[in-house]
Image: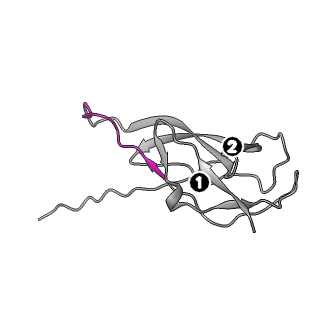
Amino acid sequence: MTTIPLVITNSTWFVFNPAENDLSVPFSLAPGGVKTLQGEMKVQIMQEPGERVGHSEPFRATDTLQLQAIVPWLNRPLRNLLVNSPVEIRYPLELLPPVYMRTVSIGDEVTMQWRVSYRISNRKSR
């Protein structure tokens, strides 16, 4: 079965590695059809450039995750499968829990959010 891979477009803060991701939609999905996908997609969050002046305030940056399906033999995105989701990046990292709709009609706007947690140890090294 031929599939169309889902990708996340590289941006200021996010780098997508297709080799680490294999989530895709079936080519046989009819226009207006619905398909529930199981799996995960990974992006690398870029390191803050340069030295940080002062660490009293938490780091915050905003970027947009752009999820799309790219037709491999045309190297073009499917126009009806494009999701833009603004994300606030914080240090310690915190992206919000997933919030999404189960089904989406063509032309509807969609909001998606993700959650990443990062623990800081209070133990002192010996």
Residue name at image x 59 percent, y 63 percent: 22
| Residue 10 on image: x %, y % | 52, 42
- Tell me where residue 37 sits by quadrant: bottom right
| Residue 94 on image: x %, y % | 47, 49
Residue name at image x 63 percent, y 61 percent: 23
Q: Residues within 10 Å of mark 1 (few under 14, many from 20)?
A: few
**In this view, the mark in front (2 or 1):** 2
Determine which of the numbered discs, if any, sits on residue 76 in the image: 2
Q: CA distance from mark 2 to mark 1?
A: 30 Å
Q: Amino acid at mark 1?
A: Pro
Q: Nearer the viewer, residue 96 or 23?
A: 23
Where is 66 relative to 122, above or below?
Answer: above
Residue furthest to the top in view is 53
Q: Which residues are magenta?
A: 43-53
Q: Nearer the viewer, residue 99 or 36?
A: 36
- Tell me where residue 108 sits by quadrant: top right
Mark 1 residue element: loop
Name the residue that disc number 1 marks: 97
Q: Residues within 10 Å of mark 2 (few under 14, many from 20)?
A: few
**For marks 2 and 1 on the same chain, the one whose residue lies earlier in the sequence:** 2
Where is 62 relative to 112, above or below?
Answer: above
Q: Going by the image, does 13 lie left or right of 65?
A: left
**Residue 49 part of the magenta segment:** yes
**Residue 65 part of the magenta segment:** no
Viewer can see residue 61: yes
